Amino acid sequence: MPAPSARPMEPTRHYPLFGGAFSATLPPGALDVSDLRPVPDNQEVFCHRVTDQSLVVELLELQAHVQGEEAARYHFEDVGGVQGARAMQVDSVQPLPLENLALRSFCQEAWVLSGKQQVAKENQQVAKDVTVHQALLRLPRYQTDLLLTFNDPPPDNRLSLGPENLSLPPWSLGDFEQLVTSLTLHDPNIFGPR
C-alpha cells in the first residue's frame, strides 16, 4: 500500500482498497486503521490524524428486500445497531445522480443519507451525537450493497491545537463526496464467481 501523501493538505488519489480491487481519492491526512488494529475483510476504515472523524467503505450483501430510500435507512439503522447507538435520527435521504459516480456503469441506484447517532466510544460511558453521512451504492449485478460512511463527531475541546494540527483541518462533506464519486472498481473478481 502506498503511504499517504507526504504533503498533508493534498488528497491521496487512486488509493488502493480491498487489495487493489477498488481505488478512491482519500482526504488529506487519512490514516489506514488496519495499520493500527484489525479491520474486517469487508471493510476499509480510515481515521483523521487529529480529529475523531472516520471514513468507512463496506462491501455488504445486497439487501434486496428493501428498495429506494428505505434501503439507505435500513443500512443507517443497521450500522447504528452494530455500534450500539442509543438514539438515531435521519435528517435527509436524497438520490445520488449516477452520472456523478465513477461506478455508474455498475450501480443501479445510489442514495445519500445524513443523520445523527448517539454513540459512546469504546471504553467510554458518555455518548455523543455523531453526525453520520452515508452513501449507498447498489450493485445488484454483484449482489452487493456498497456502503460508504463519514462519521463526524463534535469537536473534542481537549484537542491540542498546536501548529502541527492547524495544518490539517477537519474533513468536510466535500471530502466525503470526493471519496464517493472517485470510487473505482478495477477487479470484479472481488465479488467471487458469477
Image (tube, grey):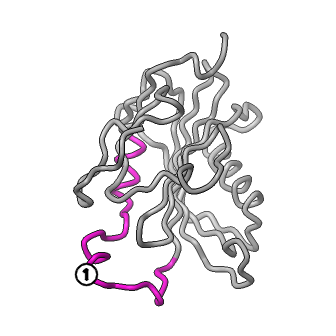
Where in the figure is residue 71, as x and y percent of width and height?
66, 43
Q: Nearer the viewer, residue 116 or 34?
A: 34
**Disc 1, SS:** helix
Vertical placement of 61 versus 53: above or below?
A: above
Residue occupying image coordinates x 72% and y 56%: 77
The relative height of residue 19 versus residue 124 in the rendered view (above or below) is above
The magenta-colored residue range is: 154-181
Which quarter shows the N terminus?
A: top left
- Residue 26 located within the stretch drawn in magenta: no
Q: Looking at the picture, how far across and down is residue 193, in whole percent?
A: 67, 11
Q: Nearer the viewer, residue 64 or 179?
A: 179
Looking at the picture, how far across and down is residue 26, in whole percent? Answer: 37, 48
Quarter of image, res 29: bottom left
Residues packed near mark 1 inside 10 Å, few (<14), some (14 to 19) or many (20 plus): few
Q: In percent of the image, x 46 and y 30: which residue is there?
A: 22
Q: Is residue 96 left or right of residue 182?
A: right
* Residue farthest along the bottom direction in this orientation: 158
The residue identified by callout 1 is 163
Q: Is residue 7 left or right of residue 183?
A: left
